[in-house]
Image (cartoon, rainbow, N blue to C red):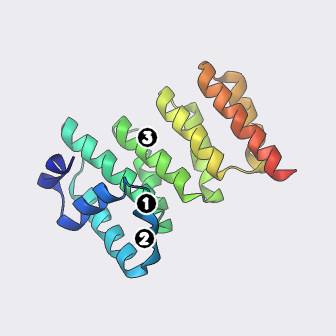
Amino acid sequence: RGRWLKPWSSPVAETAARGLADPNLVPVIRQDRALTDRVADALRETLQRRPGGGAGAVSFRAAVVDAMGALQYPAFRGRFTELIGPNEPTPVRRAAVRALGDLRQAEAADTILDLLRDKDPGIRADAVAALGKTAGPGHAERLFQFMNDEPVESIRNAAWRVLAGIFADAG
């Protein structure tokens, strides 16, 4: 994995992207605010320097966004929201949706709910999973309406589990 990261990344971003894929390392990084800030800055800079490109660049950008999501850095929410836009490649958009969910910020749920209308079933599936981490009772009606219209059974079932979780948490 490190081999395809080198052409595009600083050493800090390369290490972070690789390390943040390891769930055991994330809590260690997050314990040190200065280290968290340094890793966040390196990931932000790396993503900014690598717009678009071929398949390798798209995979790299998606990996950087996944690493950013694993860091759970609240200041990234605006960037993740930008990256879910239709002009981004699907792998980057999906990584951004997952990252929004990983932030566990209720404020992100409205943005994520809008993705339930996306034509790509992968985006919709990731949006449902992200809603499981962000949605509250105020989002239940839109999620229920989505379930009635969703053509993919596995996504409908996942939405049902999220909706049940919302009501279990509220009750």
Residue contact between numbered discs 2 and 1, judged by CB atoms under 8 Å: yes
The mark that comes first in sequence, 3 or 1, is: 1
**Can you tell which mark lies on residue 147?**
none
Question: Percent from the top left, x then y, of residue 170?
Answer: 83, 52
Position of residue 130 measured from the top left corner of the image (x, y, whole percent): 57, 45
* Alpha-carbon span between mark 3 and mark 2: 26 Å
- Image height of 23 relative to 92, above or below: below
The secondary structure type at the circle numbered 2 is helix
Tell me which amino acid carries mark 3: Arg
Drawn side of residue 32 relative to residue 56, left or right: right
Asked which secondary structure carries label 3, the reply is helix
Residue 14 image offset from top left, x and y in percent: 23, 59
Q: Which mark is residue 28?
A: 2
39 up-or-down from 154: above or below: below
Structural crowding at the residue carrying mark 2, measured as other residues with C-alpha within 10 Å and reported as few (<14), some (14–19) or many (≥20) = few
In the structure shown, which secondary structural element does the residue marked by tag 1 occupy?
Answer: loop
**Amino acid of disc 2:** Val
Which of discs 3 and 2 lies nearer the camera? The answer is: 2
Q: Going 21% across and 44% down the picture, which residue do you hit?
A: 57
**Earlier sequence position, callout 3 versus callout 2:** 2
Q: Residue furthest right?
A: 171
Q: Which mark is residue 94?
A: 3
- Label 1 belongs to which residue? 24
Q: Is residue 94 left or right of residue 18?
A: right
Is residue 117 among what the camera can see?
yes
Q: Residue furthest bottom?
A: 34
Q: Is residue 76 left or right of residue 42?
A: right
